Amino acid sequence: MSLTPIGESRQKVTAAVLRLKKLGHEPITCITAYDYATARLVDEAGIDVVLVGDSLAQTMLGYENTLSVTMDEMLHHARAVRRGVKQALLIVDMPYGSYHVDAQDAVRNATRFVKEAGAEGVKIEGGEKRAELIRCIIDAEIPVAGHIGLTPQSVNRMGGYKVQGRSLADVEQLMRDAVALDRAGVAAIYLEGIPREVAALISAEVSAPTIGIGAGPDCDGQVLVFHDILNLTFGPPAKFVRRYGDGAALITHAVEAFRADVRARRYPSDEESYHLAEETKQALETVLERKRALRR
Ligand code: KIV
């Protein structure tokens, strides 16, 4: 039986629902959203998890990578998304620097996402070495999602955005990372940019649901970036991206058509204008006529 009936009776998605989906082999769906309008559309389309990813640094703010996005910027977007999401589980990315100082600082920052933006969970990049810190955040009653493999906040250490887990040693480290996150009690593990075979092994090993991006079809769920599926990223897509629409073409066409209509005085038409009531129009005409008569 499906846990996500279509229509009004759709249930609120929680971390427990994600686990049930894994147990029931029902694929979990996740898409990023960064503002009210897209969050509403994504939520109303029946997606299970809305992720306010720190990818907003690039997609929304035009930064080169995710490293410079701040807590305040993430909070600003998370609050807007909160207002648009009703049924989906809302997870917010902890930005680079917000959990790297010490556990106290990390708990304080995670708490801000819950108190100030209504987040139902936070996501943290890193495996084994973040397990203790993740326990502290979970102790503060905040569900945490882990994120391993190609972790964009490690771009400088990785020397670019490269598929991870290709050597035997790397595969073993990824397995240790996943198991450490699972034991720490994460609500989900995001697997990014790793070979399909490794993602399949991890997904079979851990009890937490895995949500893949560039990690093949054997994860418990899949996530894609909103701007990627709609061709709004101004560049060639990564191998794993499937485009479901051409938002760039749609927007460009609409904006060009508006510009052409204004320049040709085709917009606005009389039907697109407001009008005075007939009696007000007549009263105004009388006033104007009196003024004209005085000037003569
Ligand atoms: O920031 C983000 O959008 C993410 C997803 C790609 C998993 O972390």
Image: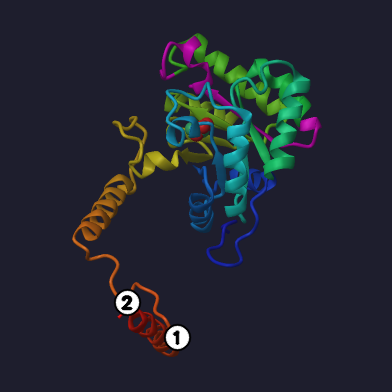
Query: Would residue 161 appear left or right of 13 to someone viewing this image?
Result: left
Q: Colour mode?
A: rainbow
The N terminus: image quadrant: bottom right
- Which one is nearer the viewer's eye here, 120 or 209? 120
Q: Amino acid at mark 1?
A: Thr
Establish if 58 lies above or below 245. above
Q: Residue 113, position in %: x, y?
A: 69, 37
Ranked by sequence position, the earlier of labels 1 and 2 is 2
- Which one is nearer the viewer's eye here, 50 or 257? 257
Residue in the picture at 42% in, 81% down: 276
Q: Which residues are magenta?
A: 138-163
Establish if 216 lies above or below 24. above
Q: Residues within 10 Å of mark 2 (few under 14, many from 20)?
A: few
Q: Is mark 2 within 8 Å of ligand 1?
A: no
Query: Would residue 285 appear left or right of 25 to someone viewing this image?
Result: left
Residue in the picture at 60% in, 56% down: 3
Q: Which mark is residue 196?
A: none
Marks 1, 2: nearer the viewer: 1
Residue in the picture at 55% in, 23% down: 148
* Residue under label 2: 271
* Residue under label 1: 280
Residue 206 visible from this viewpoint = no
- Which one is nearer the viewer's eye here, 112 or 152? 112
Verify whether residue 152 appears in magenta.
yes
Q: Secondary structure at mark 2?
A: loop
Residue at the left extreme, as displayed: 264
Query: Would residue 227 appear left or right of 68 to someone viewing this image?
Result: left
Q: Is mark 1 within 8 Å of ligand 1?
A: no
Establish if 217 lies above or below 261. above
